[in-house]
Image (cartoon, rainbow, N blue to C red):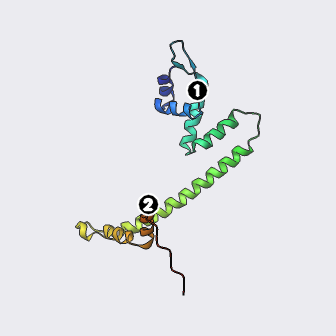
Amino acid sequence: MKIGELADATGTPVVTVRFYEQQGLLPIPARTSSNYRIYGGEHVDRLAFIRHCRTLDMTLEEIRLLLEFKDAPQADCGAVNALLDAHIDHVAERIAELKSLEKQLKALRSQCEDIQAGKDCGILSTLVVSARTPAAKRVHEHVHGAHPKTPRAAK
């Protein structure tokens, strides 16, 4: 099958198929005499594996490692288990961060219960005040290249 057919068969954009080839995740396909790429069932299976891993939010490096183990079926899967455990820990950290973000957003949302003029909006006022805090100033300075002043030595 040609690249467009592989893309259709797996629900993957052609550009993504090419990207996975460039990243070494998909084997280089054979070519016809007219230089068209020809993909087979192994490409469909491997691309489906990659896509499933991506739905689990795995990085390309994690997928690369899993594919290495998949390609060595005699090796034990201890490293696969460790990789998945590390990924689970990462997901748990992200969930905690998202819960914290949700809490912050709900607190922010509570600053403006009624629809009113923008100048009286508690959300906008809170965001403006928050932007003036020392932490926000340090972030602004870091992003824009300024360095915060060195604290003076305690007397």
Mark 2: give few (<14), some (14-19) or many (20+) Cα within 10 Å. few
Residue 90 spot, x, y in % from top left: 59, 54
Marks 2 and 1: which is nearer the front?
2
105 w.r.t. 41: above or below = below
Residue 64 spot, x, y in % from top left: 63, 39
Residue shown at 58% from the left, 22% from the top = 29
Numbered circles on residues, count: 2
Amino acid at the residue labelled 1: His
Mark 1: give few (<14), some (14-19) or many (20+) Cα within 10 Å. some
Task: Between residue 23 and residue 78, name the one nearer to us.
Answer: 23
Amino acid at the residue labelled 2: Val
The answer to whether residue 52 of the structure is visible from this angle is: yes
Residue shown at 34% from the left, 69% from the top = 128
143 w.r.t. 119: above or below = above
Determine whether, in the image, residue 4 is placed left or right of residue 45: left
Task: Tell me, for residue 43, which label it has, or none.
Answer: 1
Pick the quarter of the image with the C terminus.
bottom right
Task: Tell me, for residue 143, which label it has, or none.
Answer: 2
108 w.r.t. 60: above or below = below
